[in-house]
Every structure is written in structure tokens, then in C-alpha cells.
Image (cartoon, helix red, strand yellow):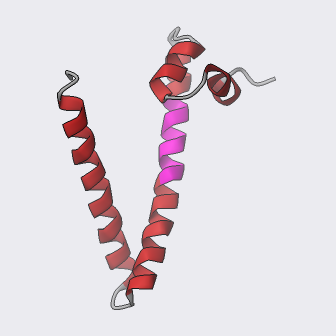
Amino acid sequence: MDETAEPAAWRELEAAVDAALWRYAEAVTGPFGPRDMHLARLSAARRLHAILDATDRAAARQALAEGATHPRVADAAGMSRQAAWRRYGPTR
């Protein structure tokens, strides 16, 4: 993907996730009020975050197993090298 297509792809992904969170909230709350809709949406976002976190960790471990270095993983994840080491470094 070239650099000009990435922002558009990101906006498309954000819109799809936002719409999915609202559909989930509507499905689980039924005829309840806006407050319940927002709470259901927050609950779905929390659950989605857990799934994405597990996927992130699996992808980093796979990249490290294939020879990537912690600085490269840190750059890809948008975090400091120290944070990448703490998060994905070898366990003792």
C-alpha cells in the first residue's frame, strides 16, 4: 500500500469499527435508552480491545520468532523500544 492510500484505508477501518460497535449496541440493548446504548458500546469496545491486544501480541511474537528485532517491532507498534522489550521480550 502506498503512503497516500493508507490514510483513506485507516478512515475506512475506523468507520467500519464505529458502525459495528453501534450495531452491536443496538442488538444487545433493544429498545432501551441512549445511556444503555453507550454503555453497551463501551462494553463492546473493551472486548474488542482485548481481542486486538491478543492479536497484537501474537503478531509480535511471530515477527520476533522470524528474526525481527525489538526496535523493528517497537517501530511497527508505535511504542518505545523499552516498552516493546517489556511487552514482548523473553520471559524469565
- Residue 30 screen position, x and y as percent: 34, 86
**Residue found 53% across the figure and 8% down from its top:** 67
Residue sitting nearer the eye, 59 or 34 = 34
Give above or below for 8 relative to 28: above
Residue sitting nearer the eye, 3 or 60 = 3
Count of labels in the image: 0
- Residue 57 screen position, x and y as percent: 55, 33
Quarter of the figure with residue 26 = bottom left
Give above or below for 31 relative to 56: below
**Residue found 50% across the figure and 68% down from its top:** 43
Q: Is residue 65 visible?
A: no
Q: What is the magenta range?
A: 49-59
**Residue found 32% across the figure and 55% down from its top:** 17
Q: Is residue 77 visible?
A: yes
Quarter of the figure with residue 25 = bottom left
- Which residue reaches farthest right? 92
Q: Is residue 77 left or right of residue 31?
A: right
Give above or below for 10 relative to 60: below
Quarter of the figure with residue 91 = top right
**Residue found 56% across the figure and 11% down from its top:** 69
Q: Is residue 70 magenta?
A: no
Q: In the rendered image, which quarter contains the N terminus? A: top left
